[in-house]
Amino acid sequence: MSVVGAVGGFAVVAGLLTIIPGVDTALVLRTAVVHGHRTAYATAFGICSGALVWGAAAAAGISVLLTASRTAYTVTRIAGALYLVYLGVTMLRDVWRRRREAGGEEAVEREVPQRTVAAAFGKGFATNLLNPKVGVFYIAMLPQFLPEGVSPLGMGTLLAFVHDVEAMVWFSLIIGGVGLARRWLTGSAAAAVRIRRTTDAVAGTVLVALGLRLAADG
C-alpha cells in the first residue's frame, strides 16, 4: 500500500465516522447556538487538537497501554464519562433555571455568559482527550494504514491530521448552518431564545446519555 492509497483509504473511513452524530457534534452545535461562531470554532479546534494527540500517541505506541492495561482504560473511561455527564447536567440545569426566571428575553440573554476562546478550546480539548474510545479507534485503525518503510509516528500523525481536516469541514458546515439560522431569526428574539433553550436541552441530554453509555461500556 502506498502512502497516497493509505491516506485515501483512511480518509474514507474517518470521514464516515466524522458525520455520525456524537459528543463532538453536539458540543460544537450547542456552542455555536449559545456563544456564536468564534467560540464554536475554538471548541472545534480544541476537539481536533485532542484527536491529534490521540493519533500521535497511538502511532508512537503510548496509548497501547489503554488496551494492554485494563486499569488504565477503566480510569480514563470513567473520567471521560464523568466529564460528559457534568457538561450535560450543567446545560440541563441552566435550561431549567432560565425557564423559572421571570423578566423576559433580556434577562435570559444576560444569563448566558460569553465563554472566552481559550476556555472554549480547553473544553473541546478535554472532551476529546478524556474519551478513551478515540485512542482505541486510532489503535485499531492506524496499523491497517501504515505502509512498509514509513515512520509510524509520522504516518500516524499525518492520518490524524487528515481526520482533523475532515472534522473541521464538518464542524464548519454546522457552524455555518447555525449562522444562517441566526440571521433568519434576527427579527424574532423570542424564537432565538427558544432555539437556544431547545439546543441546550437536546445537547445536555445527549451528553448525559453518552457519558452514562461510556461509563457502562466495560
Image (cartoon, grey):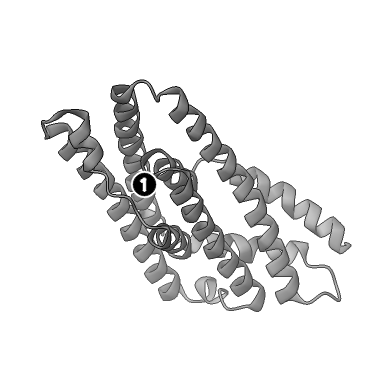
Q: Which residue matches tag 1?
A: 207
Amino acid tagged 1: Leu
Between 169 and 209, the residue placed more toward the observer is: 169
Percent position of residue 136, x then y: 56, 63
Question: On the picture, is 101 further left or further right than 197?
Answer: left
Which of the 4 image quadrants contains residue 188? top left
Which of the 4 image quadrants contains residue 106? top left
Percent position of residue 83, x then y: 33, 59
Question: On the picture, is 137 further left or further right than 12?
Answer: left
Which of the 4 image quadrants contains residue 78? bottom left
Between 205 and 133, the residue placed more toward the observer is: 205
Locate the C terminus and report the quarter of the image it occupies.
Answer: bottom left
Residue at position x 37%, y 41% in the image: 206
What is the count of numbered marks?
1
Question: On the picture, is 100 further left or further right than 171?
Answer: left
As drawn, 48 above or below 195 = below
Percent position of residue 57, x then y: 59, 74
As drawn, 85 above or below 96 = below
Residue at position x 22%, y 29% in the image: 105
Single out the residue that lies furthest toward the right.
2
Mark 1: give few (<14), some (14-19) or many (20+) Cα within 10 Å: many
Locate the N terminus and report the quarter of the image it occupies.
Answer: bottom right
Mark 1: secondary structure = helix
Percent position of residue 81, x then y: 35, 58
